[in-house]
Image (tube, coloured by chain):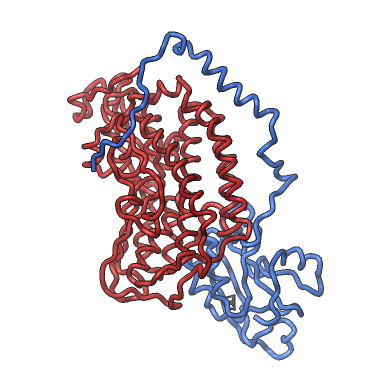
Chain colours: A red, B blue
Amino acid sequence: MYRQTEIIKDASQPGIEGDMVINVGPQHPATHGVLHLVITLNGETIKKVEPHLGYIHRSIEKMCESLSYRQFIYVTSRMDYLSAHINNHACALCVEKGLQVEIPPRAQVIRILMDELTRIASHELWWGAMAMDLGAFTPFFHAFRERETINDIMEDTCGARLTMNYIVPGGVMADLHPDFQKKTKEFIQLYKRKIHEYDELVTGNIIFQNRMKGIGYLSPEDAVSYGCTGPTARGSGVSSDIRKLYPYEIYDKLEFDEVLESAGDSFARYMIRIGEMQQSIRIIEQLIDNIPEGDFQAKTKAVLKLPKGEYYSRVETARGELGVYIVSENGTTPYRIKFRSPGFSNLSVLDHIARGSKLGDLVAMMGTLDLVIPDIDR
Amino acid sequence: MLTQRAKQVDRRPMTGLESIYLWNILKGMMITLSHLFKKKATIQYPEQKRTFSKVFRGLQVLNRDAEGRENCTACGLCAVACPAEAITMEAAERLSGEEHLYREEKYAVKYEINMLRCIFCGFCEDACPKDAIYLSQTFAPANYGRKGFIYKKEDLLIPHPIEQPEAYKKALGEKVVKADG
Ligand code: SF4
Ligand code: SF4
């Protein structure tokens, strides 16, 4: 059944007598981290949602100012830990822009392969966690089973399972594991066998669909004005895939579609991520047999110095656009670093889409925004 | 950028049969139950342990050479390279008569790594000119207090290859010993 959310007109005036204020978090299983939501309710209807941030603020931006250009990349794994590799990628791209080094083709392909594997792993975890928020516990284990295979592939090559720290300015840290191609192909086969389970278990389930369709409507105009990116914006039909709009590495030579939905509700955002996993599989399939031979790292100096100036690079993480902005004063450490994290903008839209809907639906909306709190707080 | 490329989701209202939910519940249960008879995806930790890959970056180990002398010369390069500032050390001169203990003329009397700070990036291993530190294929076990995570030199040092050859072999794992650092 299609439920239209209606916006309460006077919801911006809090503290009206009879309102109830409840706190969700900072320690709450549905917020996936230390997010604190102050929710003003009228009965069961949400009048206002105020996210309170700062519980996991580690001042990463400030910290990076005292680290060298090689070191700071690895600290950013701790921002959006589910797409740690893509964060590293963004930073490395920015440093390389300043250094003007040419990345060997092999390194570019390896980076993209790892990026896409990370994206799948991240979406898998989101899928499991979101289904768990809605009360279905089994999908979580299904998701983790497949994600484990990716983690194993990562561990073989990168040396770590979650915070890979594999990218260095100029390329990647080490060459691929000899089994990489074999294992990745096995994973693709496994994934294709399992994906129908996902659809039968969750996507096609009418109970699930009823909880998602028409919930948390975000119009394309609002998605743009709130600065939403990634699947959140694409669910509203806003084309925002950085891989297509501002291609980096060799993404412009690859064949893949930008997944778009027009409905703008939670179900649309859900479908985007399911579709993106398949597109990532498509990218991996194109590259896995065509990894060029050659160096995996360009020659760079031991101590990196960026020429004076400002540098900006952006990549598409699993959650949206991640921008890295470096101001260099010709030193060995950045003068200032700013990260434009996708999660922050995506969270800011929560109040807007939640107003007027029921408290029970809030978890579904939060789930489809795919929030990673360390990414929002940094 | 607004586009018209988006595809439409089926948004018909539920049929009467669908609104009973029974079929969907059964279908979900069937998938779940069918996994009872499939291969298990889990392993029985702690009886069974998975092995880490050869390049896994785990707990640091301070290396000794084949004669059991400590490699580290307390040059501090690892501490400089460390992004997390996890390493602290104190250097001392080797006295005569200690040649069987330390390979270089300078050695570290105190060498500590704070495992709560360490991000297991492997920069210390890269930076070391003497092959004195490497990351092994284990991880730091749990502890009751913060103090317990500050690993002293005794905790980090690899067992003596001549006095405890068994333990040395085990600690060395997949690591290839280079003749000179
Ligand atoms: S692994 Fe990295 S963070 Fe840990 S001690 Fe070595 S250099 Fe420091
Ligand atoms: S471990 Fe290596 S880099 Fe660190 S102080 Fe010892 S010799 Fe120097």
Q: Point out residue B119 in the picture as x, y percentages from the top left corner.
A: 52, 60
Q: Point out residue B96 in the picture as x, y percentages from the top left corner.
A: 71, 91
Q: Which sits in the foreground, A186 or B89?
A: A186
Q: Quadrant of the N terminus of chain A?
A: top left
A159 to the left or right of A328: right
B75 to the left or right of A355: right
A90 to the left or right of A290: left
Whether A122 is drawn above or below B89: the answer is above
Q: Which sits in the foreground, A257 or B97?
A: A257
Count of picture labels: 0
Indicate the quadrant where residue B60 lies: bottom right
Whether B20 is drawn above or below B166: the answer is above
| Residue drawn where x is 50% and y is 31% of the image | A132
Q: Residue furthest bottom?
A: B96
Q: Point out residue A271 in the picture as x, y percentages from the top left corner.
A: 40, 33
Q: Point out residue A363 in the picture as x, y percentages from the top left corner.
A: 40, 30
Whether A18 is drawn above or below A264: the answer is above
| Residue drawn where x is 54% and y is 75% of the image | B127
Residue A345 seen in render: no
Residue A215 seen in render: yes
Quadrant of picture, ligand 2? bottom right
Q: Which sits in the foreground, A173 or B130?
A: A173
Q: Which sits in the foreground, A359 or B87?
A: A359
A118 to the left or right of B142: left
| Residue drawn where x is 58% and y is 69% of the image | B112
